[in-house]
Amino acid sequence: MTDHKEYLDQHGIKKTKQRILILNILSQAENIMTVEEIYLELSKQGVVISLSTIYRIMELFLAKGLVVKSIIPGNNKGVFSLKRLEHNHHLICLKCKKTVALKGCPLTEFERNVEQQTEFNIVDHNLELYGYCNKCK
Ligand SMILES: [Zn+2]
Ligand SMILES: [Zn+2]
C-alpha cells in the first residue's frame, strides 16, 4: 500500500483514495483489465467509483506512463495493465483475457534497423499477440 503511494509520487500524480484503490487493483490483477472490470472489482470491495471517473483516472495513469493500454482487436475495447519494470510482451486470450508474458523481445534488431532507416531515436514499443488459449479455442 505504501509503495503505491510512493509510486504515484514518483510519477507526479496527486494521491487520492480513488487513485490508490485503482492502483492496488491493477497491481494485484493477473490479467489485463477493462475499465468495466476495474469497476466490478471495486464494487466487490464495496467501493463505488463511476465508470467515467475510472476512465479519467486511467487516462491520467496512461499519460503519466503508469499503465499500458492496448486495444483488443474486434471490439475496440481498451484494456489496461500496470507498466512493469521488466520489458516483455504478452499473449492475450481474446475470450477469457488470460495473459502470458513472453520471454525476451524479438524486436531489438528490428528497432535498430528502423532507427537507421528513419533516424528516429526509438525509446519504447508495444507488442501484444492475440488469440485463444487452451481452454477457449
Ligand atoms: Zn481463454
Ligand atoms: Zn520488446
Image: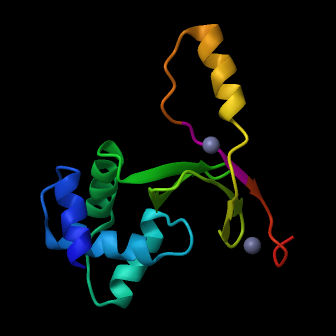
User: Is residue 39 placed above or below 65 in the rendered structure?
Assistant: below
What is the x, y in percent for residue 6? 19, 65
110 lies above or below 69: above
Magenta residues (range): 125-129
Q: Is residue 95 left or right of residue 17?
A: right
Residue positioned 26% across, 80% down in the render: 48
Q: Is residue 20 left or right of residue 27?
A: left
- The quarter of the image holding the N terminus is bottom left
- Residue 104: where, in percent of width, then height? 69, 51
Nearer to me, 70 or 85: 85
Image quarter where ligand 2 lies: top right
**Rendering quarter of residue 119:** top right
In the image, taking residue 103 as reference, residue 5 lies left or right, namely left
Q: Is residue 113 left or right of residue 87?
A: right
- Give the percent coordinates (x, y) of residue 81: 48, 61
Image quadrant holding the C terminus, namely bottom right
Q: Between 120 and 93, which is closer to the camera in this rendering?
A: 120
Query: Quarter of the image holding residue 30?
Result: bottom right
Q: Which residue is pictured at 73% across the width and 41% down the height?
A: 106
- For the point 55% across and 49% down, the residue is 70
Q: Is residue 121 magenta?
A: no
Name the spot of residue 13 as percent of width and height, x first: 17, 53
Question: Quick check: 81 above or below 63?
Answer: below
